[in-house]
Image (cartoon, rainbow, N blue to C red):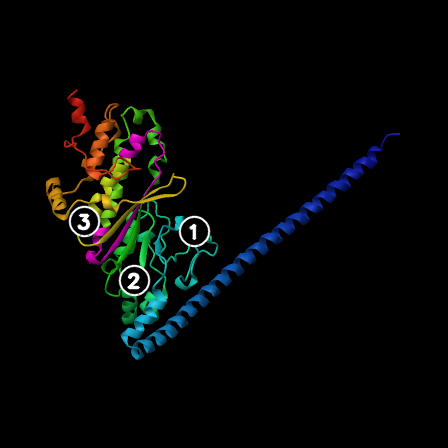
Amino acid sequence: MGNNPHDSWSRMRHLKKESNEIARDTEELENQIKDLKKQVRARKALRQSVENEFEEELKRYAKAECLKLATECHSALPRELRDLVFAYLCVQEHPIEIRSIFDFDAKKDDSLYDSGDENENDAGVESEILFRLPPHRNRSAEEILESPDAHFLNPDYVGKEMAAEISQMYYSRNTFEVLDNDNSELDFLLNKDWFNVGFAPCELIRKLRVHVRCEDFDKDGLRNTADYILGRAGQSEEKYFLDAVYYNLEDLSEIKDKDKLELELVITTALESEDDVDNDRIFMNILEAVKKPVYDFKHAGSKVTVLHRDATAKPYFEMDISKKFKVTAEDWRKELEDHGEVWLPCTNYIYHDMIGDDDEELFRCIFRRRWGMDGIYFTDSEEDDYEDDEDFDDDEEDE
């Protein structure tokens, strides 16, 4: 026997009624969940407001207590003893790194910060980081730069006179390391009197390490394109890259008392083309880009060290090439006069399309004459007999 149609119809009506009841219950629960989520958000906002108020109250309390203690110490201790205290507070064994926040990966020292991301990664880097730069692509310096957060540099905590004394020791006794040759980072470090103590860091810094990051030259595959190989493109991009290196380093000229400065430039390359001549050509152009800042400091009395790191080498490769900057002060003065009123490093660049198939020896002679080396992996050599440091274009026109 088949099912009774009447019973089947009654069954469907019952199931539909049950389904509608479940739907109403579900909607009611969803509304309750939405209301609970709204309440949770409100409570979180209230908690954050209370936490912010607590932090502000804590800062006011800390400022008052620190200022009281600092004032007592300043009046009770002679300068010699105060300097011992300052040295303990602010002189660090490792360099203080200046980097963009998107490149930030070192352990945060809470004694130097009053805010920050709790989830920052501990990469085992030993140096302390006092300054941080947030991401700054397409943003102005006013938008991207933040002041150092160390309380002992802040007059609100220690008084203006003691803050000035600590700042003098902090900037003159520590080594600062700029991890990217970005002029915003150098300007950030050197030129701002963050707490209005009467001087900018550039007046006091005595030890500075600047990284000249050239690893990205090949990152877009420029040298692998047909236009580059055929000499139809790439010159403007290369000039832009090299000129940026030069102009960023020129910001170092703001440093005062250059005769007291220890400056270390670390040039890092990753030139992986199979064309060794072209790799050496680019390396020579990089040297031309850094030449003027190096000689300006060297002949102003600074102790200048120039290192080259090859990021592609296994094992790790680093070479001190400081001795390759051996032009005397008199010869350098003459070169500046001959160059003209404005120094343009691009006049000394050699571009890819200037070197023909038969020009390698000519290029090596020029490299040797200018820098006393044959290329990146050089050996010291005597000055070459080659005298005519002419452009390759001129040489090609004579053929």
Q: Residue at x 21, y 51 (%)?
A: 253
Q: What's the CA distance linking mark 3 and mark 2?
A: 23 Å
> Label 1 is placed on what type of residue?
Asp
Q: Which secondary structure lies at badge 2?
A: helix
Q: Return the residue at label 3.
A: 296
Q: Quadrant of residue 234?
A: top left
Residue furthest out toward the top: 399
- The label shown at residue 59 is none
| Front residue of 378 and 260 | 378
> Label 3 is placed on what type of residue?
Asp
Q: What's the CA distance linking mark 1 and mark 3?
A: 34 Å
| Residue range of the region highlighted in magenta in the rendering | 252-281
Label 2 Cα neighbours within 10 Å, binned few <14 / some 14-19 / many ≥20: some
Residue 133 counted in the magenta span: no
Does residue 341 appear anywhere in the picture?
no
Q: Residue at x 30, y 67 (%)?
A: 166
Q: Quadrant of residue 161?
A: bottom left
Residue 47 x %, y %: 51, 63
- The label shown at residue 173 is 2
Q: Return the residue at label 1.
A: 105
Q: Quadrant of residue 373?
A: top left
Residue 376 x %, y %: 30, 37
| Front residue of 270 and 245 | 270
> Label 2 is placed on what type of residue?
Arg
Report how many numbered discs are placed on residues in the image. Answer: 3
Q: Is residue 109 left or right of residue 212?
A: right
Q: Which secondary structure lies at badge 3?
A: helix
